[in-house]
Each structure stands twice: as structure tokens, then as C-alpha cells.
Image (cartoon, rainbow, N blue to C red):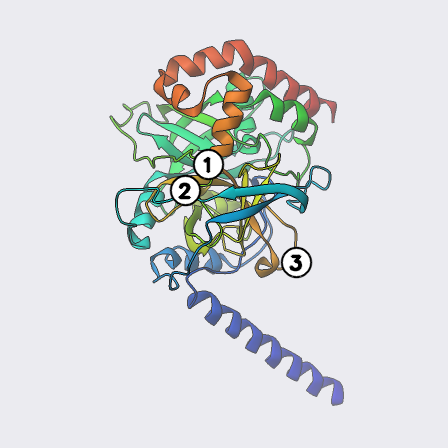
């Protein structure tokens, strides 16, 4: 009898905790997060699909009252060894851009609409066993159909482009996400591929976010119909320190970690959460390369490549990594800044993001494939066939 009574009390306590957690999630302008270190696999773990669904309306909530933000901030240096979104001593001081826009900030209801309209899901499926199926996020940043996402998501599109492996990638939109288009790689940094190729077969690869970005191009429709004359897009802001400590931002993505494989394929919903920038980080000394957003629902697998938008509806970062923790509330979502992406593209290619967007995307994808894409895909394929 004492054991039975103890068991009943434990069950009652667990139910109370569950009710409290659900109440907390539904009454916050942002909600606890889950892990994302790498892109999501569609063979994901078990769980409550209601968590992702509840977050889909979170971004329309009234944001917390604005606080006075500092004019300068310390940027801590990210760890280059732990590969777990850690920070360490070092870095420098950066200054906020004063009066960055001529217009007044938008409501987060409007910001949410802008971000959601540009948000896409990248789904890559295979019938073989050499690579796992994945689901990631991306953001259309050019109305001609140019998508910004993570390199660890785009590497699967690179493999699909090669035609040397049983893998097909789709661009999906809406909630639930529906497959509509086929993407091609417009640009992925060679530096990222060569450094991380060996991790292609790992179920939970880790990284700091350095060089972890890529550009995709929507090449054609699945059914062969004409592409839209214009895609909904969000404008990137590549200025340094445009996003600052304590600024409120919107994180938007297609989180999939808590969904089973079938649900991630057929019943995947976009999520958006209002949060604030907790910390600025750097790969170097005094540049803003990474921003820490704390615990939000987007900090889970599948969110890689999702949007981080400021209150003017401008893209200031993309979701890249999260710290590891047992619960979503304990994790720290991080994203690389558009200023870092712009600087790194210039360092890698000699051209900045604006220059790439100014060219013909189809021609650019053709050129990249012939000059770099085939060779980079072969690097990944060598690792895949090794195992």
C-alpha cells in the first residue's frame, strides 16, 4: 500500500508539472526551446507535436515592454575547440548603430508576417541508406527565389545536384509545409565543406557556426509548372552591429525535433517566437559574428537556416546552432549575423552578398556547379562511401 500511494502521488505530481509547463508555453511571448545542433533528421524522436503548433501563434503576442539598450557591448570569442556554441575570454567592444532606420519599428505581428512569408522548409528524402533524410529551414532573401540557409543543410542539396546519390531535395512553404519547388546550390563555402565533410554521416554533428551558410536557388517547380514571377522575400541587413544586446527580435523556422518521421514530412508547421538578444559573440576580435537568443521553441533540430528578424522586418541573422541540454528551456539558440555572412563571402570569393544577389541566379548556379559544386560534392561522397 505505501508503494501504491507513493506511485499515485508521483503521477499526480507529474501531471501537475505537465499542466504547468503547457500553461507557461501558452502564455509567453516566447517559449522554451529544443536542440538544433545540425539539421533535423526526419527520423526524429518522439513527442508532442502540440509544442510546435502552439509556437506558431507565439510571435503575434504583445512583446515585453522595451528596455533601454546600451550603446556599446562586449563581444565574447566563441570556442573553436568545443564545437558546442560555447564562449570564452577574448573578443572586443562594438558600438551600436545610432538611428539605423528612418522609419518607426513595426509591430511584431507585421514582422511575423514578413518573416513567415519568406520562410521555407528544405526537405531532402532518400530511399537508400547512405545518407539520412533531413529537414531544415531557409529564408528567401531575393524575389527571384534565392534562399539563405546553413551549409549543413545545403550540403544535402549539393549531393542531390550531383546526381550521384539517391537523394531529392524539395523547397516547401506554408503551415503545414507543402513541397513546391526544386532547389540548386548557388553558393556554399569550400571552407565549410572541407572542414566538416567527415561529419556528413554523423547523426548529431556539432559546430560553432563559422562558415555555416549557403545560398540556394529555386530552379523549377515539382510539377513542371512555371515559377512565380516573384517570391515573397525578406530584405537582409548586412551592417555591423545592426542587432544589439537587449534588442527584441523574431526567430522563425520549421522546428522538427519533436515530430516523428511521418509527421515531419506531412504535418510540419512553421514557428515564430519573440525573444531578445542575450549576448554578442565573435570568431575574431571585435566583429559581431554570432548572437545568442536564449531558450525559444526554434532551438531545435529542423530550425537550422531559419530567420532572425529585427523589429523593422529586416533579416539580421540565421539560426545556426544551439547549446546542448536535457530540456528545451535550458538551451541557448544562436545564429550567425548577416554582417558576418557578408564579410565571410567577401573573404572567400572577393564579392559581397549584394554582388552575388546582383547577378543572374541561374547562371550563377550553373557556374558554381561547374567550377566548384561537382568537386565539393565529391568530397562529401568520398566520406559517405567510406562508411
Residue 326 is tagged as 3
Residue drawn at the location 40% of the way across and 19% of the way down: 355
The quarter of the picture where residue 196 lies is: top right
Q: Is 290 rendered above or below residue 331?
A: above
Q: From where the camera sits, is residue 159 visible?
A: yes
Residue drawn at the location 46% of the way across and 71% of the way down: 23
Instruction: Give the SS element for disc 2.
Output: loop
Cβ–Cβ under 8 Å for marks 3 and 2: no
Residue drawn at the location 53% of the way across and 48% of the way down: 73
Cβ–Cβ under 8 Å for marks 2 and 1: yes
- Which residue in the structure is indicated by mark 2? 97
Q: Position of residue 373 (x, y in %)?
A: 54, 16
Q: Nearer the viewer, mark 2 or mark 1?
A: 2
| Mark 3 and mark 2: Cα distance apart in space | 37 Å
Residue drawn at the location 65% of the way across and 84% of the way down: 9
- Which residue in the structure is indicated by mark 1? 240
Q: From where the camera sits, is residue 178 visible?
A: no
Residue 253 is tagged as none
Q: Position of residue 57 (x, y in %)?
A: 37, 57
Q: Where is residue 118 in the image (x, y as percent from the top left)?
A: 35, 38
Amino acid at each position: 500500500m505505501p508503494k501504491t500511494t507513493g506511485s499515485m502521488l508521483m503521477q499526480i505530481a507529474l501531471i501537475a508539472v505537465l499542466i504547468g509547463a503547457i500553461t507557461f508555453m501558452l502564455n509567453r511571448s516566447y517559449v522554451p526551446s529544443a536542440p538544433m545542433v545540425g539539421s533535423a533528421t526526419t527520423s526524429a524522436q518522439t513527442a508532442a507535436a502540440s509544442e510546435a503548433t502552439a509556437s506558431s501563434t507565439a510571435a503575434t503576442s504583445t512583446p515585453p515592454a522595451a528596455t533601454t539598450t546600451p550603446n556599446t557591448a562586449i563581444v565574447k570569442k566563441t570556442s573553436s575547440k568545443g564545437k558546442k556554441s560555447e564562449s570564452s575570454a577574448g573578443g572586443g567592444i562594438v558600438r551600436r548603430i545610432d538611428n539605423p532606420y528612418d522609419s518607426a519599428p513595426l509591430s511584431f505581428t507585421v514582422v511575423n508576417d514578413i518573416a513567415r512569408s519568406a520562410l521555407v522548409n528544405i526537405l531532402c528524402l532518400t530511399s537508400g541508406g547512405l545518407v539520412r533524410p533531413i529537414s531544415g529551414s531557409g529564408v528567401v532573401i531575393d524575389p527571384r527565389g534565392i534562399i539563405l540557409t546553413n551549409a549543413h543543410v545545403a550540403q544535402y542539396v549539393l549531393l542531390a545536384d550531383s546526381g550521384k546519390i539517391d537523394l531529392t531535395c524539395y523547397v516547401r512553404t506554408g503551415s503545414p509545409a507543402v513541397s513546391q519547388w526544386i532547389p540548386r546550390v548557388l553558393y556554399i563555402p569550400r571552407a565549410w565543406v572541407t572542414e566538416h565533410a567527415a561529419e556528413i554521416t554523423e547523426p548529431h554533428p556539432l559546430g560553432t557556426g563559422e562558415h555555416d551558410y549557403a545560398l540556394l536557388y529555386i530552379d523549377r517547380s515539382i510539377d513542371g509548372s512555371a515559377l512565380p514571377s516573384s517570391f515573397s522575400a525578406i530584405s537582409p541587413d548586412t551592417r555591423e552591429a545592426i542587432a544589439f544586446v537587449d534588442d527584441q527580435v523574431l526567430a522563425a523556422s520549421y522546428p522538427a525535433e519533436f515530430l516523428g518521421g511521418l509527421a515531419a514530412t506531412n504535418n510540419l508547421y512553421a514557428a515564430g517566437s519573440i525573444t531578445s538578444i542575450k549576448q554578442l559573440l565573435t570568431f575574431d576580435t571585435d566583429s559581431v559574428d554570432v548572437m545568442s537568443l536564449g531558450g525559444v521553441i526554434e532551438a531545435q533540430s529542423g530550425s537550422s537556416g531559419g530567420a532572425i528578424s529585427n523589429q523593422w522586418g529586416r533579416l539580421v541573422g540565421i539560426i545556426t546552432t544551439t547549446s546542448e541540454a536535457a530540456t528545451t528551456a535550458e538551451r541557448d539558440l544562436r545564429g550567425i549575423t548577416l554582417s558576418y555572412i557578408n564579410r565571410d563571402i567577401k573573404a572567400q570569393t572577393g564579392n559581397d552578398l549584394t554582388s552575388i544577389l546582383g547577378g543572374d541566379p541561374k547562371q550563377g548556379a550553373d557556374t558554381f556547379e561547374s567550377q566548384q559544386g561537382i568537386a565539393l560534392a565529391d568530397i562529401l561522397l568520398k566520406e559517405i562511401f567510406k562508411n
